[in-house]
Image: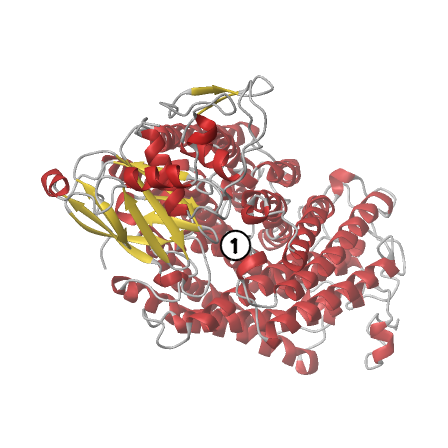
C-alpha cells in the first residue's frame, strides 16, 4: 500500500490543498469529538458540578463559528479554484494527442508519434494537451499520479493538459462507469525522455491521412470557391457567424462544423454543407482537424 | 382503559384500509425494513466481491448489478422514505397536537404508490437486474445497457409521486393542523426539519419524474434527447438528474438532524441551544440545496466558470451545517446527561456527520475534486452522511419513540451495546474508503489494482460488525413486542406533546387537548401531569 507518486507540479499543489484540508478537518473533528466527550463526562447525570444559569443562546460565539467556517471555506475555495483555473485553461497551445475512447479501450493518436492502444507516450517536462472524445458512452480519463481526470463524452471534444515531470509508467483508469468491463478499461501513461520521444517518428502521419480524406470527400470543390468559406489557416482564428456571434475555430468548432454544419453558419454564406456525421470515424475527424491545423488547404 | 390505535391488531383489513397516520407509519416502517434488507444484500455482494482484486469471486456483471440494486433500493426505497414516512408520519400530528394529517386518505394513497413503485423496481432487479448505477447516466442507460432499465425507472417515477404527496400532506398539515397556541416558534425541530424536507420533496421530485420519463422516451423510441448520435446532449441528463438528486441528499439528512435535536434535548435535559438558528438553518439548507447541483459535474465537461460558482455555493452550505453541530454540542453544556441508546446514536450522528460534512469540503474544492471525483473518497463521504448520519438518526429515533409506538420497552443495556457496535463497525467499513479514494480507486470497479487489496479487506471485514449492529436491534426490538415490559406514557420524562398521550396513543391521538408549553423543549420545567 502506497500513495501514488505525484509526477507534476499541479499534482503536488493538489496534494498541498488536500493536506491543508486534512489538517483543518482533523482539527475540527477532534474539537467536536473532544467537546462531546468532555461535556458527557463533566455533566453526566448526578455529577456534582455547577449547572446554574445555563446560557440559552450565544449569538456572538455562533457568529465566530460562522465566520471561521466562511473564511476557511473561502480561502480553500480561492486556492483550489485558482489551481483549477490553471488546470483547465493552461497549456492551451501545447502539442495535442487525440484520445478516442470506446467500450473498453483507449485509442491514442499522436500526430507526432503515431497510433497506440492503451498506451499514451509523452515527453518528459513538456506540456501536452489531450483532445478526447468517445465513440459510444461517457468515459473518464483518470491519471492518479497527475491527480487529474476529465470525462470523455461522445459528440464533442474535452481536453486535459499537463506537464509530466518524472520518467516512468503510470496508471490510467476509466473512472466514469461505462458498462460491463469498466474496471478493465485501463491504460499506461509512459513518460519518456524528450530524446526518446523525438527519436520515434509517426508511423502514419495524421496530416497525410487528413489530406487523403480532404481529397476523397472533395472538400476543395466548395471550400476553394465562393460557395463556402476558405479553410487556409482557419485554426485558431475568430470566425464571424450569422447573427453576429463570433467563435474561435478550435478543435470542437471544426468538429461541430463537420458533424452538424447547419448549427453555426459563417456570416456571408448559406447552409449548403452536408453533414459528415456517421461518414467519418472519430479517427478520421481527428486526422482532418490535424490537416486543417497544418494550415495547408 | 382506552383502546389504542393498534386494536384490532390482527385484522389485515384494518391495516390495509387504514387512514390513521400512525398505522400508515407502521406500514412504511415494515416495508422499508424489507427494502433495507434487499439493499443490504446488494452491499454484501459488493464487499464480498472486493475481497478479490481480480473479480474472481463475483463476476463483473453481477457486481455491476449489485451496486446498482444497492444504490437504487437504498436511495429511493429506504433513505428517502426512512424518517419522513415512518417517524414523520407517526409523530408529526402528535407533535403539533393534531388528530391526523390534513389528508389522511392521500396519506394511504402515498403508501400504495410507494409499494407499487417498489414492486415494479424490485421486479426489474429480480428478473435480470439493471447495470447502469443508480445515477442512470446517459447515453449508457438509454442506448447501450441491455438490462431492465425502463422497468426500474418506472418504479422510481411511481414512488416519486408518493414522495410528492407525502411532502404536500406534511406542508399543509404543519400550516393548518397545529393545536391552539402551538406557534411556529414552539414547533419541535423535528417538525421544522420535516417542513424543509417536504418543500424539497414537492419541488424537486417532479424534475426527477420528467428526467426519467425522457430517459424512457429516448430508450424506447430513439428520440434524441440525451444521446449525441441522435442529436441529444448527455450533459443535459446530468444537469436534470442532479437538479433533483442534489436537493434529494438533503431529504436524506434533514429529517435525521431533526430527530437528533429531539434526542439530545431529552438526554441532556436542556432546551435545545440556539433553537431558532437550528430551525432557520434547516430552511437555509433546504433552499440553498437547490443551487449546488453542478458540483457533481466539475469534470463532466461543464464550463469552468459554472464550476467555480457551484464550488463557492457548496462551501456556503457548510455554514448552516456547522451552526447545527455547534448548537447540538452546546446543548450538552450544563446538562444532566445520560447515555441511553438513543443518545448514543445521536452523539454518533453528530460525530460522523462532522466527518462527512468536512470531507465534503474536499469535494467542493475544485482542484481536489478533479482528483477525488468518482473515487471511493466520494463513496466514503456520502456514506458518512447517509449511514453514519441518517441511519444512526433513524435507529436513534426508533429507540426513543419505540415505547410510544408499541407500548413496550426494550432491553436498554443490549441497545447500548448495539449502538456502540454499529458505530465501530461503521468506521472500520467506511474510513478506509477515504484512503482508497485518495490512492485513486475509482468507484464501481469490479476489479482494482493489487496494491489496494489490504484496505479493501479491512473495509469488508468491518461490514461483519456493521451487520451485527443492524441485526441486534432487529432481534431485540421484535422480541420486545412480545416479551418487553409495558411502557408508561412518558418513560424518558420527555417534553414533546406526543408524550402527553398514552403509550401507544389512542386512534384520535389525544383524549384531552395537550398542554402547550410556553417555549419549546421545556426541560427546565416539570412535565405537565
Q: Is residue B304 visible?
A: no
Mark count: 1
Give percent across and percent down for residue A178. Answer: 45, 58
Residue hosting label 1 = B349
Which one is in front, A144 or A255? A255
Give percent across and percent down for residue B368. Answer: 37, 40
Note whether B422 is above or below A139 in the view shown: below
Assign the N terminus of chain B to one quadrant of the image.
bottom right
Horizontal relation, residue A192 to residue A220: left or right: left
Give percent across and percent down for residue A88. Answer: 37, 33
Note whether A82 is above or below B253 in the view shown: above
Horizontal relation, residue B307 to residue B36: left or right: left
Horizontal relation, residue A150 to residue B400: left or right: left
Q: Could you say whether the residue bearing mark 1 is in a helix, strand or loop? A: helix
Assign the C terminus of chain B to one quadrant of the image.
bottom right
Mark 1 is surrounded, within 10 Å at the Cα level, by few (under 14), some (14 to 19) or many (20 or more) other residues, namely many
Q: Residue at x 79, y 60 (%)?
A: B110
Q: Residue at x 44, y 69 (%)?
A: B46
Which one is in front, B394 or B228? B228
Snapshot quadrant of residue B427 = bottom left
Give percent across and percent down for residue A112. Answer: 22, 39
Q: Is residue B269 visible?
A: yes
Subunit bearing disc 1: B
Q: Residue at x 52, y 54 (%)?
A: B349
Horizontal relation, residue A199 to residue A205: left or right: left
Which one is in front, B28 or A238? A238
Snapshot quadrant of residue A15 = top left
Amino acid at each position: 500500500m502506497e500513495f501514488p507518486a505525484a509526477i507534476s507540479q499541479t499534482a503536488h499543489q493538489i496534494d498541498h490543498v488536500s493536506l491543508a484540508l486534512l489538517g483543518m478537518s482533523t482539527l475540527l473533528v477532534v474539537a467536536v469529538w473532544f467537546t462531546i466527550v468532555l461535556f458527557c463526562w463533566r455533566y453526566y447525570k448526578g455529577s456534582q458540578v455547577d449547572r446554574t444559569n445555563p446560557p440559552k443562546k450565544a449569538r456572538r460565539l455562533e457568529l465566530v463559528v460562522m465566520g471561521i467556517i466562511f473564511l476557511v471555506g473561502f480561502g480553500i475555495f480561492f486556492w483550489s479554484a485558482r489551481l483549477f483555473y490553471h488546470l483547465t485553461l493552461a497549456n492551451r497551445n501545447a502539442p495535442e494527442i487525440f484520445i478516442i475512447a470506446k467500450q473498453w479501450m483507449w485509442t491514442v493518436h499522436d500526430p507526432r508519434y503515431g497510433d497506440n492502444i492503451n498506451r499514451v507516450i509523452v515527453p518528459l517536462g513538456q506540456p501536452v494537451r489531450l483532445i478526447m472524445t468517445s465513440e459510444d458512452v461517457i468515459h473518464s480519463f483518470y491519471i492518479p499520479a497527475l491527480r487529474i481526470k476529465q470525462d470523455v463524452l461522445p459528440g464533442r471534444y474535452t481536453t486535459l493538459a499537463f506537464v509530466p515531470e518524472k520518467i516512468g509508467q503510470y496508471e490510467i483508469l476509466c473512472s466514469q462507469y461505462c458498462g460491463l468491463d469498466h474496471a478493465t478499461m485501463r491504460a499506461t501513461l509512459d513518460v519518456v525522455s524528450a530524446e526518446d520521444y523525438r527519436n520515434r517518428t509517426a508511423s502514419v502521419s495524421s496530416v497525410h491521412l487528413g489530406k487523403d480524406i480532404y481529397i476523397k470527400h472533395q472538400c476543395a470543390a466548395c471550400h476553394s470557391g465562393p460557395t463556402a468559406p476558405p479553410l487556409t489557416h482557419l485554426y485558431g482564428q475568430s470566425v464571424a457567424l450569422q447573427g453576429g456571434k463570433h467563435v474561435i475555430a478550435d478543435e470542437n468548432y471544426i468538429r461541430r462544423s463537420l458533424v452538424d454544419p447547419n448549427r453555426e453558419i459563417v456570416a456571408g454564406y448559406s447552409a449548403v454543407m452536408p453533414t459528415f456525421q456517421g461518414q467519418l470515424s472519430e479517427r478520421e475527424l481527428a486526422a482532418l482537424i490535424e490537416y486543417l491545423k497544418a494550415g495547408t488547404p | 382503559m382506552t383502546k389504542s390505535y393498534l386494536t384490532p391488531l390482527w385484522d389485515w383489513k384494518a391495516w390495509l384500509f387504514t387512514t390513521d397516520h400512525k398505522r400508515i407509519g407502521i406500514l412504511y416502517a415494515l416495508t422499508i425494513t424489507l427494502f433495507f434488507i434487499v439493499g443490504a444484500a446488494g452491499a454484501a455482494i459488493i464487499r464480498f466481491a472486493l475481497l478479490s482484486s481480480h473479480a474472481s469471486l463475483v463476476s463483473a456483471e453481477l457486481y455491476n448489478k449489485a451496486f446498482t440494486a444497492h444504490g437504487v433500493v437504498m436511495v429511493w426505497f429506504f433513505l428517502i422514505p426512512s424518517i419522513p414516512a415512518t417517524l414523520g408520519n407517526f409523530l408529526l400530528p402528535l407533535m403539533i397536537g393534531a388528530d391526523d394529517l390534513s389528508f389522511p386518505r392521500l396519506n394511504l394513497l402515498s403508501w400504495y404508490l410507494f409499494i407499487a413503485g417498489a414492486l415494479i423496481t424490485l421486479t426489474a432487479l429480480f428478473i435480470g437486474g439493471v447495470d447502469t448505477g443508480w445515477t442512470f447516466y446517459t447515453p449508457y442507460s438509454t442506448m447501450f445497457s441491455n438490462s431492465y432499465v425502463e422497468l426500474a425507472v418506472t418504479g422510481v417515477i411511481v414512488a416519486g409521486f408518493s414522495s410528492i404527496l407525502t411532502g404536500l400532506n406534511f406542508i399543509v398539515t404543519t400550516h393548518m393542523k397545529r393545536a391552539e397556541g402551538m406557534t411556529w416558534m414552539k414547533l419541535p425541530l423535528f417538525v421544522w426539519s420535516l417542513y424543509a424536507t417536504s418543500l424539497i420533496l414537492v419541488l424537486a421530485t417532479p424534475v426527477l419524474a420528467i428526467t426519467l420519463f425522457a430517459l424512457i422516451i429516448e430508450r424506447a423510441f430513439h428520440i434524441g434527447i440525451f444521446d449525441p448520435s441522435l442529436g441529444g446532449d448527455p450533459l443535459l441528463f446530468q444537469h436534470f438528474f442532479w437538479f433533483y438528486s442534489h436537493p434529494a441528499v438533503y431529504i436524506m439528512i434533514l429529517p435525521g438532524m431533526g430527530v437528533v435535536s429531539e434526542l439530545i434535548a431529552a438526554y441532556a435535559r436542556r432546551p435545545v441551544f440556539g433553537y431558532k438558528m437550528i430551525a432557520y438553518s434547516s430552511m437555509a439548507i433546504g433552499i440553498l440545496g437547490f443551487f449546488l447541483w453542478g458540483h457533481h459535474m466539475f469534470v463532466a465537461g461543464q464550463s469552468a466558470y459554472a464550476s467555480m460558482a457551484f464550488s463557492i455555493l457548496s462551501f456556503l452550505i457548510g455554514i448552516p451545517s456547522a451552526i447545527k453541530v455547534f448548537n447540538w454540542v452546546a446543548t450538552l453544556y450544563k446538562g444532566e446527561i445520560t447515555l441511553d441508546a438513543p443518545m448514543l446514536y445521536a452523539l454518533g450522528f453528530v460525530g460522523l456527520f462532522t466527518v462527512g460534512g468536512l470531507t465534503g469540503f474536499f469535494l467542493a474544492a475544485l482542484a481536489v475534486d478533479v482528483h477525488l471525483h468518482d473515487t471511493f473518497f466520494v463513496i466514503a463521504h456520502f456514506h458518512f452522511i447517509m449511514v453514519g448520519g441518517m441511519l444512526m438518526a433513524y435507529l436513534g429515533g426508533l429507540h426513543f419513540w419505540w415505547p410510544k409506538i408499541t407500548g413496550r420497552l426494550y432491553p436498554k443495556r443490549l441497545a447500548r451495546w448495539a449502538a456502540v457496535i454499529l458505530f465501530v463497525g461503521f468506521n472500520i467499513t467506511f474510513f478506509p474508503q477515504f484512503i482508497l479514494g485518495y490512492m485513486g480507486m475509482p468507484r464501481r470497479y469490479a476489479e482494482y489494482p493489487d496494491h489496494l487489496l489490504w484496505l479493501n479487506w479491512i473495509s469488508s471485514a468491518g461490514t461483519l460488525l456493521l451487520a451485527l449492529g443492524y441485526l441486534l436491534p432487529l432481534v431485540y426490538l421484535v422480541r420486545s413486542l412480545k416479551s418487553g415490559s409495558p411502557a408508561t406514557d412518558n418513560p424518558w420524562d420527555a417534553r414533546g406533546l406526543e408524550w402527553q398521550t398514552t403509550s401507544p396513543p389512542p386512534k384520535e391521538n389525544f383524549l384531552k387537548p395537550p398542554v402547550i408549553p410556553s417555549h419549546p423543549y421545556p426541560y427546565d420545567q416539570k412535565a405537565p401531569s
